[in-house]
Image (tube, rainbow, N blue to C red):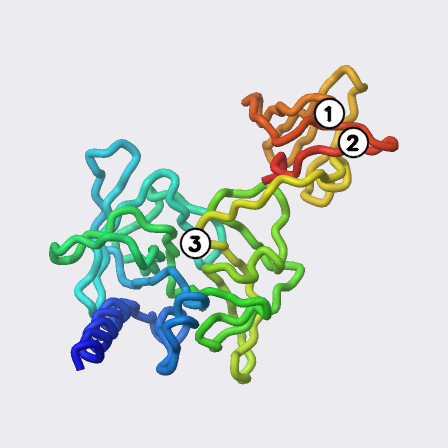
Amino acid sequence: MKKNMTKVMAMGMVMTILAGTTAFANETMLISEKPEAVTETTEAAEASMYLTQSGKVTSIETSETEGVSVVEISNEAGGLRFAVASSTIIVDRATGAYMTAAELTEGMAVSVVYDMNSPMGMSLPPYLGNVAAVVANADAGNVAVGKFDKDLTDWTNKLQLNIGDETSIQNMQGSRIRLTAEDVKGQDALVFYAETTKSIPAQTVPSFVLILGEQAAPAVSVPLRETAEANGFSVKWQGKTNPILLEKDGVSMEVMLGDATFKVNGVEEEAAFAAELMEGVMYVSSEIFE
């Protein structure tokens, strides 16, 4: 009996937290509620590790910590205060462009994405601290947050992604390498989308996918020119004794044959292994493009 009461109380706490997720009109959808029948094993393996709250910005204050702003939103759950640092990812739902905290304004509709294990203060409204991401102008279109399986279906079986050629896939680390649908599988993600099918799960071609959390992949050897050009870089060969120059959208990289170090906009970084020439093809560590 005591064990059952504990489970009931725990579920009550979860539902209280999720009640803070508010949709704007019928356009914004946030995947964060749990299905009625989920075993503890399935929940641990498949559930999203992220929660969301939506609301209207009521104030933006400069924190005593340099480069950090404290934003407060209002919603039917009582609102929320959270910190936005210079490194916090803020994406505009209307345009898909990245924004800064300085571009957030009072009255703007936002959706806040945060780790479910984040400590939350007991103040009114509660203070959350740093968040994973903020969606600005969240009422401009559909937004979903969830964990997507090998079929790109979220764990509540409500939405399935059909990644298209025009889908922009990003991660929290600002990877320079092109990400694909394979990178989304098994990951928590923030998704922007428009129309869906009426099937179960509803299917959609998302315009934007942000993979949440840390993605650490082992470095592998990749062909330099082929990988660079696939990721939009121009490649300039300057001879064996001079660095190879890669350029794209203001990013300049220098790679030296036989050297594990490389430069990004003049800043030296260390790769897992040195660039090498094999059968006329230059191979480098894949982390150069991450």
Is 60 placed above or below 281 here?
below
Give the percent coordinates (x, y) of residue 70: 23, 45
Q: Which quadrant does the C terminus fall into? A: top right
Q: Quadrant of residue 6?
A: bottom left
Establish if 219 lies above or below 56. above
Residue at the spot of label 2: 282
Quadrant in the rendering for residue 281? top right
Marks 2 and 1 close (CB-CB < 8 Å): yes
Dot 3 lies on which element? Answer: strand
Q: Amino acid at mark 2?
A: Met
Under circle 1, the secondary element is: strand
The residue that label 3 is drawn on is 92
From this viewpoint, is residue 28 visible? no
Question: Is residue 33 among the parts visible in the rendering?
Answer: yes
Q: Position of residue 237 (x, y in %)?
A: 79, 25
Please name the amino acid that badge 3 sits on.
Answer: Asp
Q: Horizontal and vertical percent for residue 54?
A: 30, 63
Q: Is residue 103 above or below residue 14?
A: above
Q: CA distance from mark 2 to mark 1?
A: 10 Å
| 279 up-or-down from 109: above or below | above
Q: How far, Cα to Cα, is label 3 from label 2?
A: 39 Å
Q: Which residue is the site of mark 1?
A: 244
Nearer to me, 74 or 255: 255
